[in-house]
Amino acid sequence: MFESKYAVPRNIDKLISKLKITTDSHNSYIKFLKKYNVIAFDEDVFDYSIDCQGESLPLEIMFGFSKKRDREDVIANNWMYLNRIPKRSIAIASLNFGDLLCLYPNGKVYHWDHEVNDLYFDMIVRNGYLEQNLDLKLVANSLTNF
């Protein structure tokens, strides 16, 4: 079905512990990380798309553990999007040319749209940022259903 870009690291349990995943609802994601490591989808072929409330969104990369920290690594991406995605959610994939899939503690997967849900700098607003829109679109009730 999927093919990992890299071998699963030998220290996978130590790397997973850095994600601070503690809920049982993340077990399917932990199993996924132990089986696959970075899945890159062909950018020219949109065979791998998700349906998000009637909108087809092309998948780009399912994050894993990688030395290419800026694009593929789950820890680096979550650090980069800290305070930009909802608290306690985990960015697990990139899609739609700048958007993310976020896994919530309840196990549900949501679409974070960078044009809707990101904090935006605005000179008119007092502190410089507009209020964050936390109303993400539901993609799946679980990673398994995704």
Image (cartoon, rainbow, N blue to C red):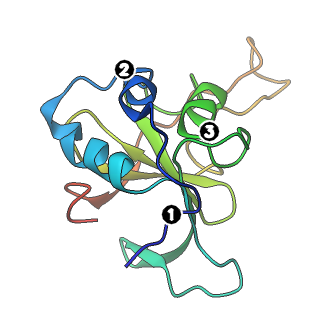
Q: Are marks 3 and 2 in contact (CB under 8 Å)?
A: no
Q: Quadrant of residue 2?
A: bottom left
- Give me the disc on residue 118: 3
- Give me the disc on residue 4: 1
Residue in the picture at 80% in, 29% down: 122
Q: Is residue 47 left or right of residue 42?
A: left
Query: Which residue ends up furthest to the right in the rendered image?
Result: 123
Residue 89 position, x and y percent, is 39, 33
Q: Is residue 112 left or right of residue 141?
A: right
- Classify 10 Å Cα crowding around label 1: few (below 14), some (14-19), many (20 and above): some
- Give me the disc on residue 57: none
Residue 133 position, x and y percent, is 50, 37
Mark 3 or 1, which is nearer the eye? 1
Q: Are marks 1 and 2 in contact (CB under 8 Å)?
A: no
Q: Tell me the quarter of the image containing the C terminus.
A: bottom left
Q: Is residue 75 left or right of residue 27?
A: right
Mark 3 or 2, which is nearer the eye? 2
Q: Are marks 3 and 1 in contact (CB under 8 Å)?
A: no
The type of residue carrying mark 1 is Ser
Residue in the picture at 69% in, 77% down: 43
Q: Which residue is mark 2?
A: 20
